[in-house]
Amino acid sequence: MPPGTAPGTPPGASPGESPRAPGASPGVPTQHRAPGQPRTVHPPWQRPHWARRDDLLDGVTRWGVMHTRHGDFRLQPVRLPRDLPLLVDWMNDPVVSAFWELCGPPELTEHHVRAQLDGDGRSLPCLGLLDETPMSYWEIYRADLDPLARHYAARPHDTGLHLLVGPAAQRGRGVGSTLLAALTRRILRERQAARRIVAEPDVRNLPSVRAFLRAGFRFESELLLPEKHAALMVFDRPS
């Protein structure tokens, strides 16, 4: 048993993490069929990219629940139009809009999200659920396949993170750094080819930069990106 492994933890599961059955998806109830009833299988072109075998992010929907001191956390891919009103409300918060620049009518946020949902799978927009309550927005993306790769020394399978904490009541309590740390561990567990996780918050967004530092990221450099002056934050896979 590896050091620090809780008694009763199945092989391959990390302490504080929910082991899951192979192929099980969190929040998706098992569909029971009558004996002899055929299973409905959608052709690949009718499935969203995150549900296909060519998923470039190794099955975000199967990453499971992460136990944290603030509650049970999991990611849920954004669904339009269901989740649009919530996202629009968050994007129009002055604290959020100062850095996300999606303040305005719903069409702005919808275009931003739909471009990812209809893309090739290199970026997946998700809601972050804490004890099953949506409270954050995340973009998990392949930084090595993103335009960001032109501005730093990208490595194959570098995984990038964007996030915002929506409700004001959830900010300033260490929630963001706790969830970042939990998700970072889960990404490295699920994406074995990834050696690093990167982020590029605006250098003026000091609460975000501090959250990444508290989550174990290090400040690598400043980047002059077309849309902002960013702080490149990096988390290296432990050797």
Image: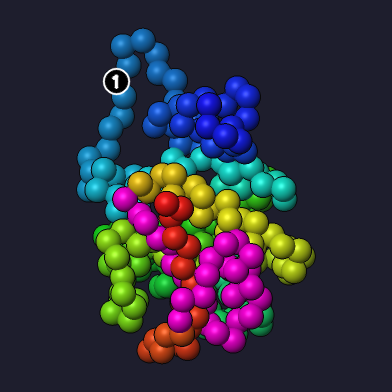
Q: Nearer the viewer, residue 43 or 218?
A: 218
Quadrant housing residue 132: top right
Q: Is residue 200 above or below residue 77?
A: below
Q: Is residue 154 above or below residue 175?
A: below
Label 1: element kind: loop
Residue 202 picture location, percent across and down: 53, 82
Q: Is residue 203 above or below residue 188?
A: below
Left or right placement of residue 5 versus residue 197 in this view: right
Residue 4 picture location, percent across and down: 61, 36
User: How is colour applied across the structure in the image?
Assistant: rainbow
Residue 157 picture location, percent across and down: 31, 59
Q: Nearer the viewer, residue 25 or 189?
A: 189
Left or right placement of residue 151 versus residue 233 in this view: left
Q: Residue at x 35, y 67 (%)?
A: 143
Determine if the magenta segment contains residue 126: no
Q: Residue at x 58, y 56 (%)?
A: 181
Say few, some or many: other residues with alpha carbon within 10 Å of mark 1 (under 14 / 14 to 19 / 20 or more).
Answer: few
Q: Residue at x 41, y 44 (%)?
A: 190
Which amino acid, mark 1?
A: Pro
Left or right placement of residue 170 versus residue 57 in this view: right
Quadrant housing residue 23: top left
Residue 92 picture location, percent across and down: 62, 78
Q: How many marks?
A: 1
Farthest residue to the top: give it.
35
Q: Residue at x 51, y 55 (%)?
A: 184
Magenta segment, which residues?
Answer: 193-221
Left or right placement of residue 62 versus residue 179 in this view: left
> Can residue 84 be seen by looking at this rendering?
no
Quadrant housing residue 38: top left
> Can residue 3 be seen by looking at this rendering?
yes
Residue beneath disc 1: 38
Determine if the magenta segment contains residue 218: yes
